[in-house]
Amino acid sequence: MPPPLRAIFRFAKLGFGVTAALFSYRLILEVWAHAPNPVAMLVFVVLCPPSLLWIFIRDVEIGTRVSYFLWVLIAMANAALYAGVRAMVIYRRKRAE
């Protein structure tokens, strides 16, 4: 695999991992019945903008099959976002040379 594609794939994995961490945090809060920390949620929203889609589908309880499916879709959207940003950076660097 060429180095630019490897870098893009690494960033896609990073985006997927950020969403997995966000979902794990939300799942733990749901199980322990704690209120989310606003600062942590703001950090997650900045790192995972597709997670804002959860606002429109709040009726789905966390921990159900539907919520797992929806969060996988959100994770794939975040991975695509991270990969797209990395691809644009690589393109800009090549263009500048």
Image (cartoon, rainbow, N blue to C red):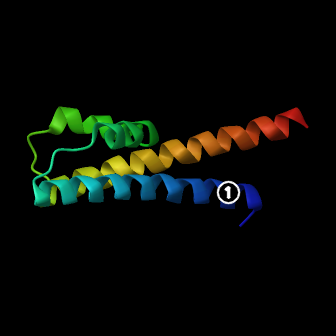
Q: Viewed as shown, does residue 66 lie left or right of 85? A: left
Q: Amino acid at mark 1?
A: Ala
Indicate the position of residue 74 as horizontal and vertical percent values: 33, 47
Task: Tell me where residue 63 appears, x and y as whole percent.
Answer: 14, 59
Residue 81 vs residue 50: left or right? right
Quadrant for the C terminus in the image: top right
Question: Residue shown at 51%/59% (left/top)?
Answer: 13
Q: Secondary structure at mark 1?
A: helix
In the picture, measured across the screen, residue 72 lies left or right of residue 7, that is: left
Q: Is residue 12 above or below residue 84?
A: below
Circle count: 1
Q: Quadrant where the N terminus lies? A: bottom right
Q: Nearer the viewer, residue 5 or 36?
A: 36
Residue 16 to residue 89: above or below: below
Q: Residue at coordinates 44% horizontally, 36% vertically from top-left? A: 46
Judging by the rendered image, the residue that carries numbered circle 1 is 7
Is disc 1 surrounded by few (<14), some (14 to 19) or many (20+) residues within 10 Å? some
- Rendering coords of residue 65 (x, y %): 14, 60
Among the 4 quarters of the image, the one containing residue 9? bottom right
Picture quadrant of residue 3: bottom right
Residue found 41% across the figure and 45% down from its top: 77
User: Camera-side residue: 71 or 2?
Assistant: 71
Identify which residue is drawn at 16% across, 45% down. 35
Please state which of residues 36 and 23 is positioned toward the viewer in this rendering. 36
Q: Residue furthest toward the bottom? A: 1
Say whether residue 74 is visible: yes
Residue 64 visible, this orientation: no
| Nearer to me, 9 or 43 | 43
